[in-house]
Image (tube, coloured by chain):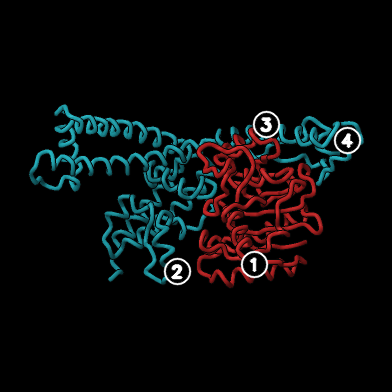
Chain colours: A red, B cyan
Amino acid sequence: MIWDTGMLLSPGTPILRERIWKGKRIWDPKHSKLSALYHKLYQKENTPELELTPKMRVLYLGAGSGTTVSFVADYVEVIYAIEPAPEPMTDLISIAQKRKNIIPLLSDARKPKEYAALIEEVDMVYQDVAQPNQVEIFLENCEIFLKSGGIGILMLKTRCIDVRQDPQELSSAAAQTLSDAGYIICDRIWLEPWHRDHSALVTHK
Amino acid sequence: MYWYESEKSIKLENGLLKADEKQTPLPNWHHAVETGKLESRAAYLHLLRERCIAHSLEGIRMQYGTDGWILFKQVGMLSEIDSSVSRLTEKLLEWDLVIMAGPRENHATYPEKTRQYLREIASRGDTSSLLAQQIIEFEEIRKKLLHDISRTAKEQMPNCSALLGPVVAARLVCEAGGLHALSILPSSTIQVLGAKTGLFSHIKNNSAPPKHGIIYQHKRVHAAKRAVRGKVARTLAARVSIASKIDYYRKELDPQCIAISDKRLLNAATCKDTP
């Protein structure tokens, strides 16, 4: 992945009104949780395991309007983007029409069986959905789509799970659930200062 | 059977993509090439992308086609117009204060006076008067929008509309996220729908719970005495819960339900047991 003066850059063609640095798109950690995660790892100097590579196939749950999707698509071979809501999907499709390796699916990540026949085995599952049972949704999808040895990244929105509980506790509970299901937790990183109460769980299958 | 072996492998259900049950999960592009269906991985991805985009677009059309969305957008626009008009009016009156260079009475508290005052400014012929004309025009648009919302709400939820008034009913159903969502909510939630800030501060910091959300706009609730207001809100929410179920499943007006509701509300409002 391309770094320059502490900024994460992305080689693809820019989307309208985007910040550019030396001809490359700036992947802003403020606007993308995945970028925030890479910045955190970059500060600790241990990214190689998580690097996006040109041969990767990625399943992205909760794609939204496709900002992060477009950056991932710059780096990988193909990205399957799941998003159930029509409004962000219109934006996502307009991005997908310009990038040949984005496959948008208007589907609900809670029901992976409905789209299981369309998506192949992937090297990485990335999840960023605002659901109280997001850990279960993540597991269900990884069970079907993630190849063994693949990477799963779960962006835990602790405030969406329960506002009353302590984010730290929720994050450890989620990590416990994942390791009980047979996943190896490689890293648990808080995305401060860019995203509050968001913890990124990096797992291996 | 794999998705690329049939033209109709992807379907739409409730506006979401659904692969046919006969399809094999986790397709393998090697298979597609070996069987001669497609010549390469690039062709495989290209076809999948084309189909997914086409079906997703169709799904968007399908989801937007339902009446719920129209009401949702109308109600959103109504509240946007309300806040914009009030902000613009406030700024305009402040501006006018400077132009006229003298204190005037506080118009914001009297909507009728504000309107009259806006008309005065509009007839003056400078830049501020153009703004006043626009604000007055917005009032007209708002009236039309209200009319539209009432009509849609009465069609879609005759019982809730009869109970709450069509506009409040429409606001409530939008806050809940659709008629089905409203019909499965517990009445305690319906009571505080639209009082998010109060509710979460109650859950987090143990402050006093909110007594009412959107249903406060119903005249029986806001006209009730403070002591019984919570009781009236509770009763109304319980009746809305029933009315929304009738609306969703039976889709017709039930005068008996409305009559009972009115009686209950009257009882709650005139209750003397409260301190």
- Residue at mark 1: chain: A
Q: Earlier in the sequence, mark 2 or mark 3?
A: 3
Secondary structure at badge 2 equals helix
SS class, disc 3 = helix
Per the image, the residue denoted by label 1 is A188
Q: Are marks 2 and 3 on the same chain?
A: yes
Task: Say if labels 4 and 1 share a chain.
Answer: no
| Disc on res. B204 | 2
Query: How far apart are the two marked residues, 2 and 4, measured between alpha carbons?
Result: 57 Å
Please rate how many residues cluster around mark 2, counting C-alpha atoms within 10 Å: few if below 14, some from 14 to 19, many from 20.
few
Of the residues shown, which amino acid type is indicated by label 3?
A: Ala
Q: Which of disc 4 and disc 2 is earlier in sequence? A: 4
Q: CA distance from mark 4 to mark 1?
A: 41 Å
* Other-residue count near label 1 (Cα within 10 Å), few / some / many at <14 / 14–19 / ≥20: some
User: Closer to us: mark 4 or mark 3?
Assistant: 4
Q: Chain of mark 3?
A: B
Q: Closer to the observer: label 2 or label 1?
A: 1
Rendered location of residue B57, percent (x, y): 63, 33
Task: Tell me, for residue B54, which label it has, or none.
Answer: 3
Query: Where residue A90 sits in the image (x, y, percent)?
Result: 57, 36
Amino acid type for the residue under numbered disc 1: Arg
Label 2 and label 4 in one chain: yes
Residue that appears at 91% across and 34% down: B35
**Mark in front: 1 vs 3:** 1
- Residue at (20, 33) in percent of width and height: B128
Q: Kindly give the residue lying farthest to the left in the view shown.
A: B102
Q: Which mark is residue B33?
A: 4
Callout 2 amino acid: Lys
